Image (cartoon, rainbow, N blue to C red):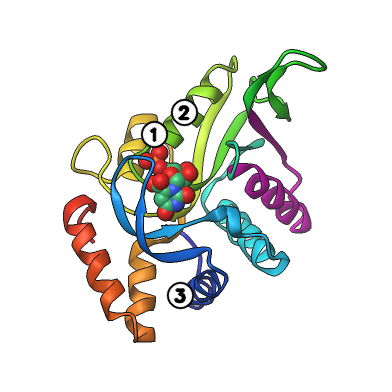
Amino acid sequence: NTTMAASFKDTFIETAINTGVLLFGEFTLKSGRKSPYFFNAGLLYDGQLLSATADAFASTLQTNVADFDVLFGPAYKGIPLAAVTCVALANKGINKAYCYNRKEKKDHGEGGTLVGAPMAGKKVVIIDDVMTAGTAIREAIAILREQPGAQLVGIVQLVDRRERGKGDSSTAQEVAKEFGVPVLPIISINDIIAYLKTRGGYEDQVKAIEAYRAQYGVAA
Ligand code: OMP
């Protein structure tokens, strides 16, 4: 359901590894799961990589989400992703708006926790970094739903780890079903494993990821 060609994915994954965005080792996740890999979207600070990321989000939206008004980038890592995607869309002649939330409530100045385009009464797409057990995306959806008339019409995430959510389906599948919207990944763990296998020299990492997936993953 996404449009990113295998060549794009491979180049993206290779660059992510070379820049330390995608790491292999031992990481304790937000959900408490102990993972042999971690994708840190906060390290997408290189202009070219950020630009490629924005283009990937923009073309995924263009192909898969018919009608939307606002991109919502949840704090913190969703903020630059939503902003650069908004610019990438504008460069394709598609003028949309974006917004984000603050994690801290502000009691002076303009007040409130939302910054940027109002979501009230609008069709909103959430631009997210990574989905694991689904806590972060559910928090973002709850913020959106506090805005009167705001309608969630899609979610695009940079990396789908394809892990179980509350039940046996993946978090992305559960969220798609529960909220009735497409949940589109730019890349998934399947793409990462395919890349590592083609590239060679990553046998230990692949083994560790496959063992992890046997515990937390969903069927490939
Ligand atoms: P869940 O809330 O369990 O879905 O975890 C998703 C969040 O965890 C993301 O929004 C990230 O903040 C963080 N995360 C990563 O950034 N990269 C990963 O590879 C894994 C996680 C994670 O902690 O699960």
User: Of callouts 1 and 3, which one flags the residue occurring earlier in the amino acid sequence?
Assistant: 3
The amino acid type, in three-letter code, at marker 3 is: Ala
137 displayed left or right of 204 = right
The residue shown at (73%, 13%) is: 107
Q: Mark number for residue 139? A: 2
Residue holding disc 3: 6
Quadrant location of the N terminus? bottom left
Region rendered in magenta: 78-102
The residue shown at (69%, 63%) is: 51
The residue shown at (65%, 20%) is: 120
Quadrant location of the C terminus? bottom left
For label 1, the crowd category at 10 Å Cα-Cα, with few meaning under 14, some 14 to 19 and many 20 or more, is few
Residue holding disc 1: 135
The answer as to whether callout 2 falls within 8 Å of ligand 1 is yes
The amino acid type, in three-letter code, at marker 1 is: Thr
Is the C-beta separation of discs 3 and 2 under 8 Å?
no
Is the C-beta separation of discs 1 and 2 under 8 Å?
yes
Residue 184 appearing in the image: no
Image height check: is 115 above or below 36?
A: above
The answer as to whether callout 1 falls within 8 Å of ligand 1 is yes
150 displayed left or right of 116 = left
